[in-house]
Amino acid sequence: MTGIAEEKHSGRICAGRKTECRQTEAFDEVAYTKPSAIICSSGFVGMIRMQREQKSYAKEFIEGMRQAVRCDWCGRDKKRSRSGLCRHCNDIRKDLERVEKLVSDPKEPKTFVLDWQLRVARQKKKDCVIWGQMLHGILNGSVDSLGLEHWLCRVAKRIARDNQMHRGTATVLGWTFTPEQRQMLAYLFWEIFGAEASHKRESRAMWQVQCDSLET
Ligand SMILES: [Zn+2]
């Protein structure tokens, strides 16, 4: 069995006294004040303790992410304008307002291009808001193992071009990660794909509007 705790404590027996185990910083005060003897060389106790610490940190991490000041639309914690939006979303807002102004202007001819611009601008806003709602769901709801499998499949598809690589791993993921750890992982995936979504928002919005046009 391997792990930081085992390596640092190899061969030592800590009888609940900090003085006998000064060589490591891996264990916290709580660990040392346990009255019962802890055989560190087994690694097992250390592993359990590490898991407990990870769970605790995942909770703190999620709480910290909840407290962060975020864009009202996309949810990213970028610098916000006075409108409460990040620069990216604020540009989309201004573009949408510009097009809506043209559409409401009676002197402006209502062309196909103008209608297209309006629909694309609205779609871009919708896409921003969807990503913000997704984040809200991650931080304030729960991330089930299927949700985590979904994110891993997205990674595999994008990087390895194989969307089957992690298909069916939900059960193992559920056994391996605590609810808080699943939340944390989903948040980290959301950050990656949320940033990617912002880079491709224009083209995805145009594609979506085109699809909608074909359906109607
Ligand atoms: Zn934003």
Image (cartoon, grey):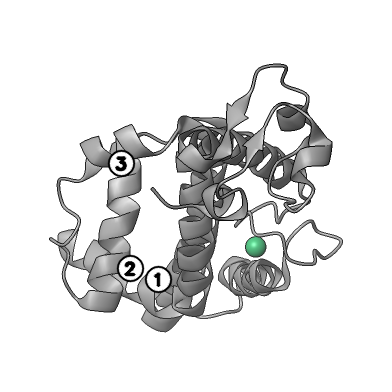
Question: At label 2, which amino acid type do we have?
Answer: Val
Indicate whether 67 appears above or below 15: below
Residue 102 at x, y = what percent?
Answer: 61, 74
Indicate whether 93 appears above or below 74: below
Q: Which residue in the protein does label 2 denote?
A: 209
Instruction: Give the mark nearest the N terminus, 1 or 3.
Output: 3
Q: CA distance from mark 2 to mark 3?
A: 36 Å
Secondary structure under the numbered disc 2 in the rendered image: helix
Residue found 53% across the figure and 48% down from its top: 6
Instruction: Name the quadrant where ligand 1 sits.
Output: bottom right
- The image quadrant that residue 39 belongs to is top right
Q: Residues within 10 Å of mark 1 (few under 14, many from 20)?
A: many
Disc 1 beta carbon < 8 A from ligand 1? no
Residue 128 at x, y = what percent?
Answer: 54, 60
Closer to us: 21 or 65: 21
Q: Which residue in the protein does label 3 denote?
A: 173
Q: CA distance from mark 2 to mark 1?
A: 6 Å
**Where the C terminus falls, by quadrant?**
bottom left
**Left or right of 116 on screen, residue 173:** left
Indicate whether 24 appears above or below 37: below
> Cβ–Cβ below 8 Å for labels 2 and 3?
no
- The image quadrant that residue 120 belongs to is bottom left
> Cβ–Cβ below 8 Å for labels 1 and 3?
no
Q: Residues within 10 Å of mark 2 (few under 14, many from 20)?
A: many
Residue 86 at x, y = what percent?
Answer: 72, 66
Question: At label 1, which amino acid type do we have?
Answer: Ala
Q: Which residue in the protein does label 1 denote?
A: 205
Q: Residues within 10 Å of mark 3 (few under 14, many from 20)?
A: some
Residue 24 at x, y = what percent?
Answer: 72, 52
